[in-house]
């Protein structure tokens, strides 16, 4: 894996280059292992973003 990222919905580690979907939210890119995870995220992004 070149660019390892974590899917914010299911927590799976994936290669960012091979993500099924990439969405931008508040200026940050989020990578998803499946389209289903991206749809869940789109429905309610704050639910899946941890506040830092």
Image (spheres, grey):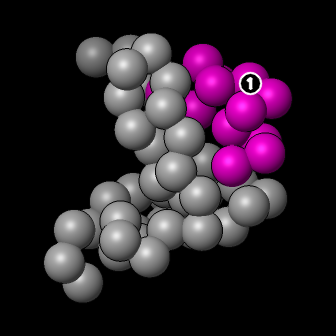
Q: In x, y percent, where is residue 3? A: 22, 68
Q: Quadrant of residue 50?
A: top left
Tell me, yes or no, if residue 8 can be seen here: no
Q: In which quarter of the image is residue 32?
A: bottom right
Instruction: Answer with left or right where residue 20 lies relative to residue 17.
Output: right
Residue at x 52%, y 51% (from the top left corner): 22
Instruction: Answer with left or right where residue 46 lies relative to residue 19.
Output: right
Residue at x 69%, y 49% (from the top left corner): 38
Tell me, yes or no, if residue 35 can be seen here: yes
Looking at the image, residue 27 lies above or below residue 41:
above
Q: In which quarter of the image is residue 23?
A: top right
On the rendered image, what quadrant is the C terminus found in? Answer: top left
Looking at the image, residue 39 lies above or below residue 15:
above
Q: Tag count in the figure? A: 1
Give the SS element for disc 1.
loop
Please tell me which residue lies in front, 49 or 18.
18
Please tell me which residue lies in front, 2 or 6.
2
On the rendered image, what quadrant is the N terminus found in? Answer: bottom left
Dot 1 alpha-carbon crowd within 10 angstroms: few under 14, some 14 to 19, many 20 or more: few
Residue at x 79%, y 59% (from the top left corner): 36
Which residue lies most toward the left here? 2
Q: Does the magenta stretch include residue 20?
A: no
Please tell me which residue lies in front, 6 or 17.
17
Q: In x, y percent, where is residue 45? A: 64, 25
Residue at x 35%, y 65% (from the top left corner): 16
Return the residue at label 1: 44
Instruction: Answer with left or right where residue 20 lies relative to residue 24.
Output: right
Please tell me which residue lies in front, 51 or 15.
15
Span highlighted in magenta in the image:
38-49
| Magenta stretch: helix, strand or loop mostly | helix
Looking at the image, residue 34 lies above or below residue 24:
below
Which residue lies most toward the bottom here? 1
């Amino acid at each position: 894996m070149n660019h390892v990222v974590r899917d914010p919905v299911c927590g799976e580690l994936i290669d960012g280059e091979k993500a099924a979907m990439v969405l931008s939210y508040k200026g940050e890119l989020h990578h998803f292992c499946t389209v289903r995870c991206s749809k869940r995220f789109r429905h309610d992004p704050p639910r899946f973003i941890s506040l830092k």
